[in-house]
Amino acid sequence: MVLACGGSAHALEHEHRIGIGPSYAALKVDDKSTMSTGAGTAIHYTYGATDMFDVLAEANWTDVALHQEQDNKDSPHTRPSQVSSLAAGVAYVGARPCAMRSSWRCLA
């Protein structure tokens, strides 16, 4: 016989999550023979506003074409060396099953 019991679960709203990780960017510059690529850092933040919706924000900074030399006489002499972005929004995450159970539940 197998007996499985679960305790009461709590909703996941008002939960804060923050993270940091690597980022990668590829930038196409007109009149340049190759893509400018590079690595950087991204930071993200998530706030569980309700059981079904999260508020999200992300920022990243990436160095591209760092110390790159002029490969073609027609290539532009001034071009970006860094790509940055900032994004924010709301995400629907659906009803989380553990947030819907509020009492002891045992199965035998």
Image: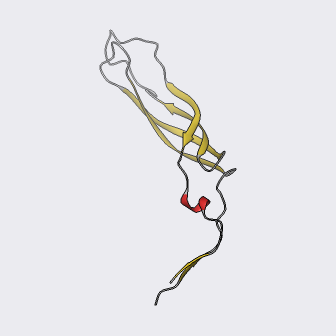
Choose between 89 and 24: the one closer to the eye. Answer: 89
In this image, 17 relative to 69: left or right?
right
Q: At which x and y percent is residue 98?
A: 58, 62
- How many numbered circles are shown? 0
Q: Is residue 71 above or below residue 66?
A: above
Splitting the image into 4 quarters, where does residue 32 fall?
top left
On the image, the x and y values in percent for residue 76 come to 40, 11
Tell me the residue at 36%/13% (across/down): 30
Residue 8 % position (x, y): 65, 70
Q: Is residue 104 above or below residue 43?
A: below
Q: In this view, which residue lies farthest toward the right?
A: 14
Q: Depth check: give the residue in front, 26 or 33.
A: 26
| Image: 79 above or below 19 | above
Rendered view: 73 above or below 84:
above
Q: Residue at x 48, y 20 (%)?
A: 80
Q: Nearer the viewer, residue 64 or 24?
A: 24
**Colour scheme shown:** secondary structure
| For residue 26, side relative to residue 17 (left or right) | left
Q: Residue furthest bottom?
A: 1
At a point 55% along the width and 40% down the height, the residue shown is 91
Residue at the image position 46 percent from the left and 28 percent from the top: 66
Residue 104 x %, y %: 63, 74
